[in-house]
Image: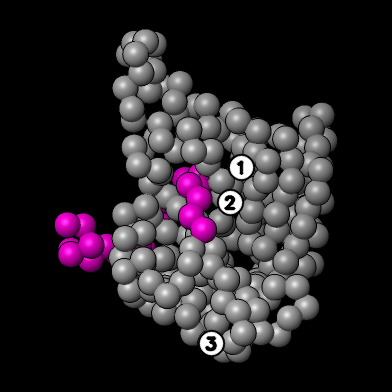
Amino acid sequence: RTTHATRPITMGRFSHLILTVLPLLAPADWVATTVENRTSGEELARRVRGRLASMTLQIENFHMEDIRSFYWWDGKVQDDPEVRATIDSEVPFQTLLEVLEAEHPYEVPMIISSLHDEAAEAEEPGGGKYLMASTAVNDTSVETAYDLAKSLVEVRYVACAQVETVGESNTDFLITVKTLGTSKAQILLDFGGLTFDWKPMRGNGPYLKWLDENVKIRADAEE
């Protein structure tokens, strides 16, 4: 279960290696993953802190947020309550990724962070192969927010859509999706009533492979 080049003037034939490595060595700023519940999140935090301490590294904060996850798995939409764990840290992304992969209880965990615009452009001219996006859905019911998130996954425009309540409100929600850059056009076309905040995304290899396999691009969307 789960629960995102321009040619340099110099640097010659090794430049592609530099472009690949720099995003992984950059400070993480934050890394997000999901777990089954808060108990699992607390255990993951303890294990991650322990591994990092052995490297004389540390994380600043470990936040947890209750969410509802809709995602494509085993040929259908899955719907699970989960907890999103967000780590604030200056530890390099690759280091946090390896530590989280070693300790995570999921078969295919989501371990993601934002990819700075310059790195995204280097990897994929136009803004990045993998994207995360958030949209606010206000003055509505939780059932409507869930139905909207589920619809995005059902049509395979996104592989994952997570819903969270905004503050103490019972009518304001945030939907966050993980998808491919090539799916952006069809999302904007068919869900044009929503305003998305798009960000290039980096993540662990198995999760990005899962995105590649489970987001479907319509033929007319590629034209």
Q: Which comes before the other along the chain, label 3 or label 1?
A: 1
> Looking at this view, is 128 or 95 the one in front?
128
Question: What residue did someone put label 1 on?
Answer: 97
Instruction: Indicate how the structure is coloured in the image.
Output: one colour
Q: Position of residue 124 (x, y in %)?
A: 36, 38
The kind of residue on which mark 2 rests is Ile
The answer to whether marks 3 and 2 mark residues whose Cβ atoms lie closer than 8 Å is no
* Relative side of 194 to 145, left or right: left
Which is in the foreground here, disc 3 or disc 1? 3
* Residue 10 - label: none
Q: Residue at x 40, y 43 (%)?
A: 127
* Residue 144 - label: 3
Q: Position of residue 209 (x, y in %)?
A: 40, 51
Instruction: Classify residue 110 by image quadrant.
Output: bottom right
The answer to whether marks 3 and 1 mark residues whose Cβ atoms lie closer than 8 Å is no
Q: Does residue 204 show up?
A: no
The C terminus - image quarter: bottom left
